[in-house]
Amino acid sequence: MSVTPTRPAPGAAATGIRTRTTGAAAVALLLGALAYTAWVLELVIATGLDPVRAYVSELAAADQPLGGLFRATDLVAGLLVLIGALAALASTERRPWTVAGFSALALFGAATALDSRLPLSCAPTSDPVCAARETAGLVPATHAAHAVSSTLAMVGALAALLLLTVAARRYDQWPALARLGPPLVLAELAATVWTLAEVAVLTAGRDTWALGVGQRLQVLLVALYLALLAGCLARRPARTGTPDMPPTPSTPPRGDR
């Protein structure tokens, strides 16, 4: 008696690769979120900076004792998010809002990594001499470059949060992100407005009110969103973008004669 051999379904190997790539993206994004919150170490380590007033990036300033540590964690965070975003782009279904969202997330990761290579030379919110030099334009060009890379990073983060939330709701995928994404986006927008208003006050030469708190909230919300997105990717395997193949009817065994 002969039995017809069972062959793997078409596209099974590709589906397996996509699923593994999506899992790798989830791990990278989760680790990136953890690295992006390294600034919470200031709660247990004396940094000499006031977390209520200081920029988060001042922790990584060239003249700070722990600057090297925070520059390294920013670099790791940026690279991990970039890798996770590119892996997600390669493995998830090619739909406009999803592609745009992960592209914005890749921009955020790349700009964050670049940001770590363009540190401030000093901490202007805690050092009056540094603030005076910055106002007079006597600081290194890295201050201006850092402002550009930081702006790109935050624009990328905001765009990614908004676009991926729309993707989750429009395409009926990632239920947790569809449910929790909108309040996180609104909170991130509020924290961003708060931070920009405080920066404007500081630039005008007046004392700020909780600039550091607003920016830390802004950064924390991005990290929470990344962790939520990583959980959604880990739970839902990537779809191949092709319709499911109908099951192949099994061939009953035949007896040889």
Image (cartoon, helix red, strand yellow):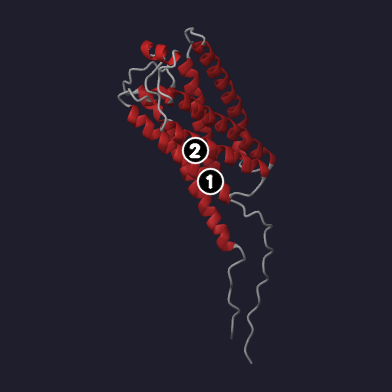
The reply to whether residue 178 is in sight is no
State the CA–CA distance, disc 1 to disc 2: 11 Å
The front one of 179 and 100 is 100
The front one of 1 and 166 is 166
The reply to whether residue 51 is in sight is yes
Q: Position of residue 167 (x, y in %)?
A: 65, 40
Q: Give the residue at x 57% y 47%.
A: 89
Q: Give the residue at x 58% y 68%.
A: 8
Q: Foreground mark, 1 or 2?
A: 2
Screen quadrant of the C terminus: bottom right
Screen quadrant of the N terminus: bottom right
Q: Which residue is mark 2?
A: 110
Query: Left or right: 104 with respect to 206?
Result: right
Instruction: Name the amino acid type tagged 1.
Output: Leu
Q: Give the residue at x 39% y 34%.
A: 73
The local secondary structure at tag 2 comes to helix
| Label 2: how many Cα within 10 Å (few below 14, some 14–19, many 20+) | many
Q: Which residue is mark 1?
A: 86
Q: Position of residue 24 (x, y in %)?
A: 48, 49
Q: Is residue 155 above or below residue 134?
A: below
Q: Quadrant of residue 113?
A: top left
Q: Position of residue 16 (x, y in %)?
A: 54, 58
Q: Quadrant of residue 58?
A: top left
The front one of 29 and 118 is 118
Q: Position of residue 47 (x, y in %)?
A: 33, 21
Instruction: Name the amino acid type tagged 2.
Output: Ala
Q: Give the residue at x 55% y 46%.
A: 88
Asked if marks 1 and 2 touch (Cβ < 8 Å), the reply is: no
| Nearest to N terminus: mark 1 or mark 2 | 1
